[in-house]
Structure formats: structure tokens, C-alpha cells
Image: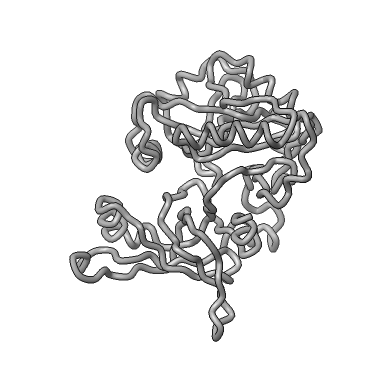
Amino acid sequence: MGTKQINKVFKKLITEFPYMRCSLMDKIDRIKYPAIVQLKCDGTYRSVVVDNGNIEIYARSGEKSNLPRFADSLKGLADGVYIGELLIRGMEDRFKANGLINSDTEPRDIYIVCWDYLTLDEWKEGKSSRHYKERFQKIINNTIIDCVDYQIVKSLDEAKEFYKKVVANGGEGAVLKNLDNKFKNGTATDNIKMKEEAVSEFKITGFQEGKGRFVGTLGAIEAISGDENVVTKVSGFTDEVRDYIWNNRDKLLNTIISVKYNGVSKAKNSDKYSLMFPVFEDFRPDKDTADDLEYIKNALK
């Protein structure tokens, strides 16, 4: 059982860390111009909580990160919560960088790219009445953290041009936002994720041994959606990742992974959906819940 299910029975038994999720392109009509479009970072999500000089760093799941050197580099930040993604300078390989950041040994050259700021009271409440333009100004004017690349756009065409440049430079995508959006814990209908390829999160339920040259190691991951309506077998691993997964099956079972896919289909004699051409994208230790069927379908739009 996840945190949300437990808290439905025992109200606020487990602390839920606020997270505002983006909607998909089916909500693009909610955007009002001028709007702001930002680079979609490919690091690992973190909230940096600064309270009276004390700095604590949390993953999306609420797990506290032990990164003392990085925390020291943030001294001088004003109280509040800085929301963004951790990356390693000079390392373009997302899998390796995120693996190092989430390892037991803190790597050097960690930095954070931020896109939102909340006061401590807003963060504790999981909502803010302030417009995004005001919250983001706290990031733009900051000299200690990095601000996400952004552009103010007057139309969807301008946003698409920004997105195309991001993809052309090897980036993952972009996020289009209303300047007056208000932070809430949940899915925001005026924050739109712009991506060409669909990527959703699934929970690992099993592992299949490979055939041929892959005998004795991983062949495919068995995975399921959060509502258990989509089941899939995921492949597309490098040899390094394949061996890592096979040797850490007990540790990885029931954890969350990102999966890239081209479509969703339903077999004639089954009540379950499956993914078309599912490919492993990344481990998601910062998440503890998988996406549901509706989100998985909408990600393709």
C-alpha cells in the first residue's frame, strides 16, 4: 500500500510531501497568453527546505537525501522551499548522473536547477494563493541556485519553437505554464508537459530471464500501472543496466520505473491494456506510485 491509500484510512498518518504535477497536451486550451515555457529538466526531482538556516533535501517520495557537501553550497538561501531537479555538472548521461546522486556516496559537482519557490507555510499547507510569476521571481533573482531556462511566449507557436530548439539540442521536452497559476498538491491543468514521445511510470512486478546470449541475466521487466489496468513487459536495456537489474531483483521489485512507448492497445480476450513498443527509460526512486490508464493514454496526445 502507498502513502495515499494509508492516509485515506488514517488521516495524515504519514506526511505527504506536496508535488504539483503537469497535465498533458489534452489540456493545452487552458493556457492563457502571454505564458511561460521552460526547459523540462532530465535530472532527479528534489525539494530543498530552508528553515532558519537549516537545510534539508527531500525526494518526491519524502525520502531525505544525505548530501552534506551540496547542502553546504546552499548556505545563504532565504527560508522557504526551492523546487527543482538535481544534476551533475559536466555529466550528460542521465542514467549515470541520477544513479550517482541516489547512491550512498555523495558525488561532487551536484547542482540544482529550480523552477518554483514556496514559503514554509505554503509548503506545509500544500498550496499557495500567490501567482506563479511572483513565485518564479524568487528563482530568477537567486545567485545561489540555477534557474531553469525559460521564455515568455505570446502564442502556442512560440512555445512550440522553444520546444523544437530544446529537442534539437538533445533535451527531453518543455513545460508550458500560465503566469497566474497557483501551486497545489496534485495535477495542475495550467502546467502542460510538451513531449514528442510518451513516457509514463510503472511498478515492477517481476523479471524474466533472457534467451540466447542473455541466458543467466535479464530478458524483460514485468510491470503494471497504478490502477492495474495496464500490464507490460519492458526491454531496451544496455548490458550494464541489464546486469544491474538482474543482480538487484529483490531490491528493485515493486519500485517505480519510467517507460517510453508508442501506443496503448487492448487484446480481444483480455480486460487489460498493454503498451506498444515499451522501452526502459529510467529508474524513479523519487516516486512511489505508478501512473493510471487515463494518464498513460493521454500522454500520447
Q: Is residue 231 left or right of residue 6?
A: left
Query: Which residue shows up at 64% across the image and 25% down it?
Result: 151
Q: Is residue 224 above or below residue 59?
A: below
Q: Please determine whether, in this image, residue 90 is positioned above or below residue 238.
A: above
Q: How many marks?
A: 0
Residue 174: percent from the left, percent from the top?
A: 59, 37
Which residue is at the front of the view, 136 or 278?
A: 278
Of 176 and 253, the residue lying toward us: 176
| Quarter holding residue 128 | top right
The x, y position of residue 142, in whole percent, is: 60, 16
Residue at position x 31%, y 57% from top?
245
**Image quadrant where residue 253 sits:** bottom left
Name the residue located 46 percent from the left edge and 18 percent from the top edge.
73
User: Would you say 164 lies left or right of 176 here?
Assistant: left
245 or 56, which lies in front? 245
Front-lying residue, 88 or 48? 88
Residue at 70%, 61% (x, y): give it. 8
Q: Residue furthest bottom?
A: 269
Horizontal relation, residue 98 to residue 179: left or right: left
Say above or below: 196 vs 105: below
Q: Position of residue 21 (x, y in %)?
A: 65, 45
Quarter of the figure that contains the C terminus? bottom right
Residue 114 in percent (x, y) is at 57, 28
In the picture, the quarter occupied by the N terminus is bottom right
Q: How is the image coloured?
A: one colour
Asked if residue 65 is positioned above or below residue 245 in the image, the reply reads above
